[in-house]
Image (spheres, helix red, strand yellow):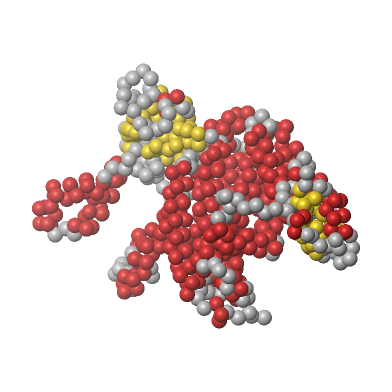
Amino acid sequence: MTRAFQLFRQGSGAYVAIGSGWAWSSLPLPWLWAFLGGLWGRGAILLAVDGLVLALAPSLWVLQPVALGLVLIIPRGICLLRGSHWRAASLENRGLEYVGEIAARSRSDAIAQVARRNGLIPPDLRPGKGGSAFPLPPPGLQPWWAVVRLTVHAAFRYRLVVVLMALLLGAVVVLPMIIKHDGTAQGFTQILLTYTLGVISALLSLVTLWLACGTLARDIDECQMQVVATKPIARWQIWLGKWVGIMVLNAMLLGIAAGAVYLLMQWRATQLPPEVQESLRSNVLTARRAVKEPLPDLDSRVEQLIRQRLPELEAKGVNLAEFRNQAREMIKANEQLVPPEHFKRFRLDMRAAPGNPENRSTFVRVKFHTPELGAKRPYELEIVVGPPETPTRRGTLRSLAAEAAHEIEFGPVPLDNEGFLVVDIANRSDKPLLFPLEDGLEVLYAEGGFGLNYVRALLVTLCGLGLLAAIGLAAASFLSFPVAAFLATTVLILGLSTGTMKSVVEDRTILGLDHETNLPAFPAIDAVMVPVFEAALETVNLVRQFAPIDAVSSGRSVTWGDVARASALVVGLMGGVFAAIGITAFTRRELATAQTHH
């Protein structure tokens, strides 16, 4: 039985043969195979992965056998597919010249046949290259796929991936060691999920912008793009190939770093006290759906009030626009206010909840404000859930602090005959309390596991990185690298400045008010800039509505609907806009005018 071998030779020295195709010999111990083949860097990484699995296996084998199995299988699968290519590249880097490929029974047979023919390989000994009925990629996409591979290879060649992977793994390992948690489930999660994933997302965001600007702008400035553009490939394929290559790198780096966070979190969780572990599994390591009471239609109630009092208001010459705003705030305050020894009833629609919510653990999340300035004392609240006037109702009396969210577990709770969950909150303190309409009360119930929820959160994060890649490539399509990097970074900073934009939109002025007249100081400028800030704020909020890190670190569900909406809105809509701008600019750009600057 014959197989294909690649032959290499350095000068007039001996021939070296390595197998083509899949590297089956790497499967048992890939790190040993890498060391024997002179792949020292890859061997060290593979050995570290196997060592990590060996260290975590005693504590995680019962809890997460699938995760540990994937950590073992994935590196071996990569070695199986790419091992021969790594060996060939290593030999070429050591100065050996590629001779060709031959079909032979063994390595020694391949070397002997080539040596007898003085380095010539006759056509009848070359391995057959039978065509596939379904080639991957299809012939029409092969030029585009070549650009993807060149983009990925360039990142590896410039050691960007190695350095960034070291930074990401350093953030995963070092950050939890430097910042100690308080021993609670919330503190543990904040360090290992919120902070760590936040650092990973920030690093990948900056590198995505830098790489997106550099991979296109530098190719143009250094006259490398002119060579690619002469090939039979459209400009839009080059642009999209760059984008897909960057996203392949992002997916790989995010998967490695997030996988390390997942394994580290599972391992560290086994070291917590049993009661903290139970709280962690029920509050964080889960996927909980949130249900809120729909917001009341304040505008219709305001219009109804104006219609009732319109003759009176016109007779007094009242400004209807100002009265409308004041009436809305008054109605909203009355909806939120709960005086002492009074209660507020919430009816939450649970009919759309998958499964039977009555058989699942339920959490009531409460948040309220107080008119007392700087008050630090707790306030007494009585919370009762279940159908009114039934023996199945259950309640609790709690002393809770204002201005903070509190989650109270009730276990399985009964619904009324219409499928609604009734929650009564009674104010047992001596001061009135305000429960915000937006987030004063919501109910959380478990609907899935943490692992799949974690994967969906990573997919939403990847959508945000896809938008940043499109922004960077769009800037590099018509600007030099420094200017493109500056413009893309400015867009990123603008996206993080929602507080300033919101303040401008609410005050209706960008340069402030005149202290004497209390009117805008420069109304002409405000007339132009305030609508711009409104549009920018709406655009940024379209992206920022997806907060996967906050959701997964608080045990909230990131649904497949969220992933689909993030893909459609963030990547498809907004990324598509930047892609259209970038492809149009790149297609119209005259590449021959680009010169190398040395």
Residue 485 vertical placement versus 384 (above, below): below
Tell me: 308 left or right of 44. Answer: left
Q: Residue furthest top?
A: 391
Residue 75 in sight in this render: no
Q: Position of residue 491 (x, y in %)?
A: 49, 65
From the viewer's side, name the closer residue of 318 and 567: 567
Going 56% across and 50% down the picture, which residue do you hit? 134
Q: Residue furthest front?
A: 124
Going 49% across and 72% down the picture, which residue do you hit? 587
From the viewer's side, name the closer residue of 577 and 112: 112
The quadrant holding residue 441 is top left
Tell me: 452 left or right of 527. Answer: right
Going 42% across and 54% down the picture, which residue do you hit? 569
From the viewer's side, name the closer residue of 39 and 339: 39
Residue 421 in sight in this render: yes
The quadrant holding residue 359 is top left
From the viewer's side, name the closer residue of 506 and 518: 506
From the image, which quarter does the C terminus lie in? bottom right
Residue 587 vertical placement versus 263 (above, below): below
Residue 390 vertical placement versus 186 (above, below): above
Q: Position of residue 191 (x, y in %)?
A: 61, 45
Going 60% across and 29% down the picture, which residue do you hit? 275
Q: Position of residue 67 (x, y in %)?
A: 64, 38
Q: Position of residue 261 (x, y in %)?
A: 63, 44
